[in-house]
Amino acid sequence: MDQDAFRDTYKAVNERRCPYEKAVLTGNCGCTQAKRFCIAEREGLCCGADAAQARCLEYLEHLRTLARFALKTNDSHSALPHAKAMRIQVGGLRGVQAALALETDDRRPIEDVDALLRAAIERFGSLADLPYQGIIQQIAAYKGRQSFRERRRARKQRREDDEPA
C-alpha cells in the first residue's frame, strides 16, 4: 500500500486520533481510552472519548508552547520529529507524575494517560495551572531509546572498564 493511500484510509478509519499514539505504540505508556486498529499490517490508535482527546490535545499544546527552549525549536505548530514528539509525550507525562508525587520508575511505562491527566486536573484545578517548570525539566531530562551506535559504544566502554589492568 502506498503512503498516500494509507494516509487516506487512516483518516477515514480513525475519526478520533489518539494524541499519544507514538508513546502508546512504542510501549512507553498506556491508556484506557486508546483503541487499537490495523491497516495493511500497520497499527494505529483512536481515542474512545471526545473529552479525553480534548484533554490530551490541550495538555500537549501547553507543553509544545512552553517546551520550545528545551526542544530547541521556535515553531510550536509544525510537526515535530519523532524523537522530540516522544520527549514531549513521555517526558510531559513523567512530569505530571512527579508533580502529583506519584512513585515513578523511568523504566516502567505510564499506565493510564487519561487517568493521570484527570488526577492532575483534580489536584491543580486545570491543565493551565500545572507546575510546568518541573514538567519541562522532565521533558529536557527524558532520553529516548539509544541509537545502535550509542548502545555499541556503551557496551565497548563497559567491556574496557571490566578488563583487569
Image: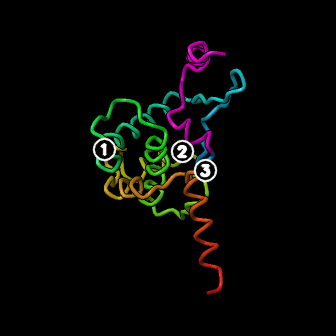
Crowding near the residue tagged with mark 1, few <14, some 14–19, many ≥20 C-alpha atoms within 10 Å: some
Q: Under tag 2, what secondary structure?
A: helix
Does residue 128 sit above or below 106 in this rendering?
above
- Number of numbered callouts drawn: 3
Pick the residue in front: 57 or 42.
Answer: 42
Highlighted range, magenta: 1-26
Residue at the front extreme of this rendering: 165
Residue at the right extreme of this rendering: 41
Q: Nearer the viewer, mark 1 or mark 3?
A: 1
Find residue 79 and report its image quarter.
Answer: top left
Find residue 47 and report its image quarter.
Answer: top right
Q: What is the x, y in percent for residue 103?
A: 54, 65
Crowding near the residue tagged with mark 3, few <14, some 14–19, many ≥20 C-alpha atoms within 10 Å: some
Identify the residue at image location x=62%, y=39%.
Answer: 25
- Residue behind mark 1: 68
Distance Cα–Cα, label 1 vs label 2 = 22 Å
For the residue marked with disc 2, what is the amino acid?
Answer: Val
Judge whether residue 12 is colored magenta: yes
Pick the residue in front: 156 or 23.
Answer: 156
For the residue marked with disc 1, what is the amino acid?
Answer: Arg
- Residue behind mark 2: 113
Q: Under tag 3, what secondary structure?
A: loop
First reached walking from the N terminus: tag 1 or tag 3: 1
- The reply, left or right, for residue 131 in relation to residue 144 is left
- The reply, left or right, for residue 45 in relation to residue 58 is right
- Residue behind mark 3: 111
